[in-house]
Image: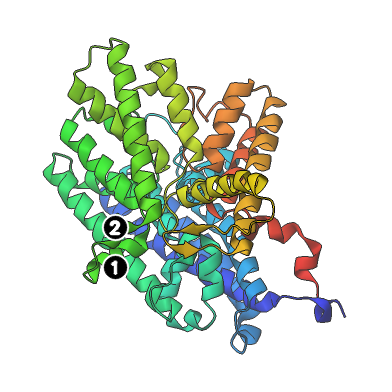
Amino acid sequence: MLHAKLAINPPLIAYLCGLILAFLALIMGLMAGPAFFLGDGAGPAFGLSALIAAGAAGLLIRLGRRRAETSEIRGRDGLAAVGLAWPLIAAAGALPYALSGLNPGLMDALFESVSGFTTTGATILTHLDELPPSLLLWRALTHWLGGMGVIVLMLAVLPFLGLGGMHLFRNESSLGQVRLRPRVAQTAKILWLIYLGLTAALVILARAGGLSWFEALCNGLSAISTGGFTTRDLSIGHYGHPGLEILFTVFMFLGSLNFALYYQACRGDWRGLFRDAEARVYTLIIILSALLIAASLLAAGLELSPWAALRQAFFQVVSVVSTTGFTSADWLKWPGFTQGLLFSLFFLGGCAGSTSGGIKCVRWILVFKGLHRALRQHIRPRAVIGISLGGRPIPERLMTAVWSFWVLYMVVLAASALALTALDLDILSALAASASSLGNVGLDLGLGFAPLSSPAKAILILEMLLGRLEFFAILILFQPQFWLR
């Protein structure tokens, strides 16, 4: 009787979650090879992690296979699958950390995994130079998989999911709004090819810039996914190489643009890169912010040349607005104005249809357009005033969704920061940690994430997941009416 009232298909959802977990188990199994080859001691951890994940995946697939083979993925099924699969992915991804012998607590291992897959880049690990190389590669790989989306990758390589895959694709990230081909599997393949091409280009250029192949690969995977994990405690600043700073600045920026623009460019329409309203506003914000910060650095007398001030300003601004979280200098020692401006950029985010987190630039554009309309409406109460972007009218339902997202973002941010203050964090540190996690930025204001208590880390883990999935795929699971007809 209860099953008849359900508005979802539990066997289908179990089957989909099982497939996703099996895919991740395969990747962890493949990671065991390099670990054993390098002899860094992490091979058994990856092998055992793959077996545990494969066992859980096999159980889920067995539970749902019979019903799933004759079912189509519907809207609620897609939402439930995405909302439930991501915590499973994070839990499985935590296994290599927990079994590696580094002795992180279970909460720490889960924090590192969630931070990786959500491309947040906040870390509880220190002395990165001493970590097993295969574990450093795993950290970067979680960024790369999470940036475009594990589910999007599955849609690209498992064509039979394409029949109802749009519900999965749409709910995993802002990339779900990108429709390049009629079939979702074709769109997923195009996006992953672009993603792979940008990654390969960065890795090759980073190697040419002086990094080893290993460090070029790890940092390249993190930069394109706008993640933030690196192989060094001092991030990109460790290398002290201006050319590398410029290179990573460019590719962090490229990773934060709408990937549909690259597809248009590949088809010969380069004008889209310059005509897109969101990309123009986003670029203008970066330029103005970097110039203000460079001027502040020079005025503060920090013994920087104008060129060095500009280079560091652009690097840090792009790192923050793209939600990557790399650092090239200790920006917490910069003047208070620059710190305040960079912190305000925590709330911007990259472009829609990118790997960036945050509110997204296009939502801010629409928020300000809505405010401008409200002012005009006060002057002319009877006028019917529409909103357009890039010459296209914006439907009212979309404006409602934008306002709902914005309000929800601020409410979750404030509630989380308040909860962190109850766990003995001062208000500034609590707000910074909350904004960094919810926006998937990964930077902090000097407190660090490792010293936080387990309840505080649990709050930040939830924020990272909410920010990555843009709230609704997670929060909707707590609505009773979602599950019942």
The location of residue 48, given as percent across then percent down, is 47, 57
- In this rendering, the answer to whether 239 lies above or below 168 is above
- In this rendering, the answer to whether 87 lies above or below 194 is above
- The quadrant of the rendering that contains the N terminus is bottom right
Residue at the limit of the structure toward the top, as seen here: 301
Residue at (35, 61) in percent of width and height? 259
Mark number displayed over residue 481? none
- In this rendering, the answer to whether 303 lies above or below 443 is above
Q: Are marks 2 and 1 in contact (CB under 8 Å)?
A: yes
Residue at (26, 57) in percent of width and height? 198
On the question of residue 326 being in view, the answer is: no
- In this rendering, the answer to whether 160 lies above or below 269 is below
On the question of residue 176 being in view, the answer is: yes
- The quadrant of the rendering that contains the C terminus is bottom right
Q: Residues within 10 Å of mark 1 (few under 14, many from 20)?
A: some
Residue at the limit of the structure toward the right, as seen here: 1
The location of residue 306, given as percent across then percent down, is 20, 21
Mark number displayed over residue 264? 1
Q: 139 or 290: nearer the eye? A: 290
Q: 225 or 398: nearer the eye? A: 398
Q: Amino acid at mark 2?
A: Leu
Identify the secondary structure beneath mark 2.
helix
Q: Is residue 302 left or right of residue 165?
A: left
**Label 2 or label 1, whichever comes before in sequence order:** 1
The location of residue 374, given as percent across then percent down, is 63, 47
Residue linked to disc 2? 273
C-alpha span from label 2 to label 1:
8 Å
Q: Residues within 10 Å of mark 2 (few under 14, many from 20)?
A: some
Q: Amino acid at mark 1?
A: Gln
